[in-house]
Amino acid sequence: MDRYVLVVSFNQEEDKCAKALEAAKQIYDKLGSIASCNSKRRVSLFPACSLSGGPASQRWYFAVQTCHGTSQFCSTEWEELGSCQKNDEQEESPSTMEACLSALDEQEEKTDQPDPQQTQLYEEAAEGLHLLSDQLPPPGKALLDVIFLGFAEEAPKLKDFLPVIGSLKHMQTWHTAKMTIVTEHHAGWQKPASNLSARVVHPSSIMTCIDERELWRGGVLIREKKFASEVRFEGFSSEPRIERHGTACCLLIQDPITTLTTSYTQR
């Protein structure tokens, strides 16, 4: 499956804004290197197949939504990373992070315009996130990861922040988005983490938010028709594992109550 990674950041203080932008740039650079390696390899260990049955290499896409102070930027489309196919006559367009930094600088220089209200910024951000969600493949056709950079001590007020929470919940419900909040202030971001069912990681572990080996994630429902009983395995993912006699695909259960491991080997 193709991978889509969205970085979201809402910060008010200037030093926190700079820190969040630097973290977003690190994630962007890491994903770019992963995508470049995949494009050189051409076909992954367990490639997805097209409608014609031919194997295809995994593609990586990136987008960012930042709201720093009274300035904000949202990607208008997903940028494909590691793509080297460009026409010589075609001008090279700026990357997502370059466009983000340029847009934020331009907004800060415009001092003659009145500052928008926080509720207005959150509503505009939610609209941008919905537009990005509309560009995603149909549910079950790609993996979506959302990394929320919460470097401020306190999360935005939930009453004003509900439009953004709703847009992220839409991604989680329809596209099985994996939510991660990066912060060192766990108590201040407890409510958003609970509402989004997100895991919370320390900024020092930000590079571990994306598992490039992950191939698929979802849930399994086992139903017995005779007695109308069922067993659910919620939230598991599969990833390749190199073994001595070939390449194996391991099924990892994330539910702490259930233990199930299934593997098959490609020789």
Image (cartoon, rainbow, N blue to C red):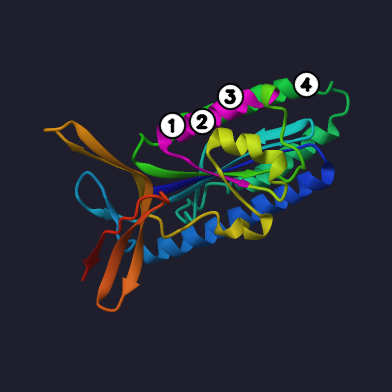
Q: Which x, y percent locates residue 127?
A: 58, 24
Mark nearest the camera among 1 and 4 is: 1
C-alpha gap between disc 3 and disc 4: 16 Å
* Whole-number angstrom distance, CA of label 1 to CA of label 2: 6 Å
* 252 magenta-colored: no
**SS at badge 1:** helix
Instruction: Tell me the magenta residue range.
Output: 160-181
Q: Secondary structure at mark 3?
A: helix
Relative placement, left or right, of 210 versus 45 is: right
The kind of residue on which mark 2 rests is Lys
Q: Nearer the viewer, residue 29 or 158?
A: 158
Mark 4 / mark 2, whichever is N-terminal: 4
Question: 29 above or below 265?
Answer: above
Q: Answer with mark 3 or mark 2, whichever residue precedes in sequence.
A: 3
Dividing the picture into quadrants, the one containing residue 229 is top left
Q: Residue at x 20, y 37 (%)?
A: 223
Which disc number belongs to residue 127? 3
Name the kind of residue labelled 3 in the image. Answer: Glu
What residue lies at 46% left-to-right and 29% top-to-bottom?
A: 134
Residue named by callout 4: 117
Q: Is residue 34 above or below residue 75?
A: below
Mark 3 surroundings within 10 Å by alpha-carbon count, few (fewer than 14), some (14 through 19), many (20 or more): some
Left or right: 4 in relation to 142: right
Q: CA distance from mark 1 to mark 4?
A: 29 Å
* Tag 1–tag 4 contact (CB < 8 Å): no
In the rendered image, the residue lying farthest to the left is: 226
Q: CA distance from mark 3 to mark 2?
A: 13 Å
Tell whether position 162 is magenta. Answer: yes
Q: Are marks 3 and 2 in contact (CB under 8 Å)?
A: no
Q: Which residue is mark 1?
A: 173
Q: Position of residue 172 (x, y in %)?
A: 47, 35
Query: For mark 2, what is the residue?
Result: 169
